[in-house]
Amino acid sequence: MEEDIQQTITAISEEPNGENALKILHVSAYFGPTKGMHINMFLRVFNNIVEELDSAVLLLKKKYLIFESSKPEIIFVLQETRNYIRSFFKQNGGEKESFAEAVNLLTFHLLKAEIPLNYINHALSLVAYVIHEAVELTEISAGLPSLIVTGLKKHNRLLEAYVFGKSSMEFFAKALGKTHTEILTLRHNLATVLDAGEQHAKAVKVLQDLIEKHLKYSTVEDITKSLVQHARLLCELSRYKDALSLYEILIGDRNVLETSDREILEAWRDYAILLSHMGRHSKAIEILQDILIQRSRIMVEDNEFGLLTRQSLANVFREQGNCVRALEEITEVFSESTKFHGELHLDTLRAERDIGISLLSKGDHKEALEKLEDVEKKFDQNFAESHSDILRTRANIVSALMNINEYDKALQISEDAFEKYKNIFGEKRHEILRLKYNIGLIFLKQGKQSEALKILREVYAGFDDIFGPEHDETVTIKAELENLGYFQPALHKAAEERDLIKIVSLSGNKVNINKEDSEGRRLLHHAASNGHIRVAKYLLKMGAMYNVQDFSSATPYQLASDKQMKDLLNSISNLFKDVKRGILDNVESHKELINVKDKNGYSLLHWAVCNCHKLVVQQLLDAGADPKSISLKGNTPLHVASSKGYKEIAEILLLSVTGNDLSYLVNYKTTEGGNTALHVATKNNDLDMVKCLLMYGAAYDMENIEGLTPVLLSTDQHIFDLLTLIQDLFSSVQEENSMTIIQLKSLNYDNLLIFAKVHNSQGYTLLEVAIKNQHENFIHELLELLEDLNYSK
């Protein structure tokens, strides 16, 4: 091969324009091997005479030493030719002169106002050649790093500019001295890069480990990929905040749908997963969906990448709380991965484990446990015990066991796994902290509060370091510590100190006045035990639970320190008894305490509704009872009325509120299931209640925590038909279907009234959907229908 190249070069040198043609080869021998060269970049070599350049290029093409890309103006030099020329000059002399020509040519182009990224890549290749193959050429190339940094800065590639500049400065400063003119220039240019964006200075600490290594950069993409690998490593080490800073700077304003490189798409996927871990689920979903679109464009056959991305998407849905969608997605991924990879492939096992985790999140704890234990056996059979996926699986098994109250077994697995894996990975990994957190929770359940407090404090410090103070996991464990007395809540302190002004101020900020402390005591316990009657009355007025027990089973009444406090609490107990029996006598005299609650979070209004005492319900509302009062399980009085089928009482409640309060009440979701009153009514197949709720603006398509809308919960054909017709009409109005008005005109008065009042989950009526979409004909027709409706009324 070398002999053929030599013969060809000799033949070219004998041609009329041969010497000029060879200049192109000599200079480009040091350029990036995979990067094409624009023909016009060599014009300067030919004194800007286009004809001579074209002639030289044509000669090289005829001799097959260069070839065109899909674009005629872009040419490539064969790698074998580059290697031969470099080797020839190094052995026979002439390398310094030839390399200097390449430096001069690129310096000329890099000094221009507009610099193609391609030229910067070739300059990077020259620097890489000096660092790794030709240290003796350091002086000649000393000015290139500054020009490269400036060029990258112009392209807003600030992070790549900083990493390359810092790394190359260490090499050149060591060779030429820190006071060399070019080193000082480079140092100044690096400062301008940091000044170009405040956030880039924050990345300096993160990048120190990376920069200390002499990375083999040959292109901008190589720098980017090195940074991506570093960000991925930070994620694996659970250094999420550092990784997030690096990703946000690295990705900047770039768009997923403009990314053509698989490795960069993988970086986008890693970034999305990280965003989800940090609680930014919607953004993560948007990115992952864009990745799947772009993947279908640029790598259609890459099933593995698509499966991994879809698996990530399923996990984000689960972290978002959309367990049904997550389970559907991950089940499909598992099925396809089994066909593509086989049953025992790592990716397949991970997908199967994620099915178990989704079942766990969905509340199917026993089924989840069976699935996770089955997957653990497969992991154990095929991977070393130190494999991180075995740790993750065991941590999930512990969660499943805790949910079915098998605490002893959960503790045994947790402690065993924790001791093994902390020696391998250290204690600052997310998964290990979660395992440790479960140990703390088990100790709590077993009454070992001091042991639990010690562990939870350590886990809190770890979560705060990984996620920051605002993340859900950090906030959750902080709440546990508050309950254990590690953070003394300001309200409890205020209650002990009889500071009514502070209590009023804090409760006005929507602080939970029924929050327990390390002994299970609420604010009312403290007020009662210290004889603070004014504080107690205020707390009861704000909805304090009058008979809730602390961890020692003591109620505020039992802790009361004087007769006046006991009389107050006893009168409330009697008031609840009266309301449950339908007795009205004492309601008026207790108006200021009308929103007091019992140990279940039930208010007087809840009990009046529950026992179908319509007159008491109305009297309580007239006295100021809050129809939006929430029990511990998140039930409003309207949920109670809906579950009991008390339509008339439901109407009384709905008539007591207007505007936003009405929307809040009719669409409020329970804590555990995320069900609205309409979900409850449809599940009970109560057509009259369904119509009543729709009449008052219930959202027909509101999803519960499992992603189910009301229509999916009913087995009654009439309810199904009604809600399906509503769905069809909303879709028809959206699409401006001419049949919509005809369908509406065919409805009887009662149903038409429902269709005029019903809302979708965005809070829009049919008319508002038409207005939003600017369907003028529909708006006119609908308004006429509504006028007829009012006239009929």
Image (tube, rainbow, N blue to C red):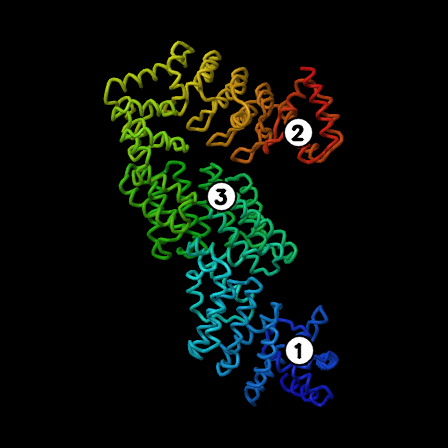
Amino acid at pointer 1: Phe
Which is more foreground, mark 3 or mark 2?
2
Residue in front for this viewpoint, 361 or 584: 584
Q: Which percent across, then down, holds residue 568?
A: 30, 18
Residue assigned mark 1: 42
Amino acid at pointer 2: Leu
Q: Residue 48 vs residue 423: left or right?
A: right
Q: Which percent across, then down, holds residue 419?
A: 33, 52
Q: In this view, does 63 lie above or below 723?
A: below
Q: Residue 564 vs residue 400: left or right?
A: left
Residue in front for this viewpoint, 719 or 23: 23
Q: Which percent across, then down, holds residue 541?
A: 38, 22
Marks 3 & 2, CB-CB < 8 Å contact: no
Q: Earlier in the sequence, mark 1 or mark 3?
A: 1
Q: In which quarter of the image is the N terminus?
A: bottom right
Pointer 1 local density, CA inside 10 Å: few below 14, some 14–19, many at least 20: many
Which is more foreground, mark 1 or mark 3?
1
Q: Can residue 349 be seen in this view?
A: no
- Separation of residues labelled 1 and 3 (CA atoms): 55 Å
- Separation of residues labelled 1 and 2 (CA atoms): 67 Å
Q: In this view, does 133 lie above or below 602?
A: below
Q: Is residue 693 above or below residue 95?
A: above
Pointer 3 local density, CA inside 10 Å: few below 14, some 14–19, many at least 20: some
Q: Which secondary structure lies at badge 2?
A: helix
Q: In which quarter of the image is the C terminus?
A: top right
Q: Can residue 107 be seen in this view?
A: yes
Q: Residue at x 34, y 56 (%)?
A: 423
Mark seen at residue 766? 2
Amino acid at pointer 3: Glu
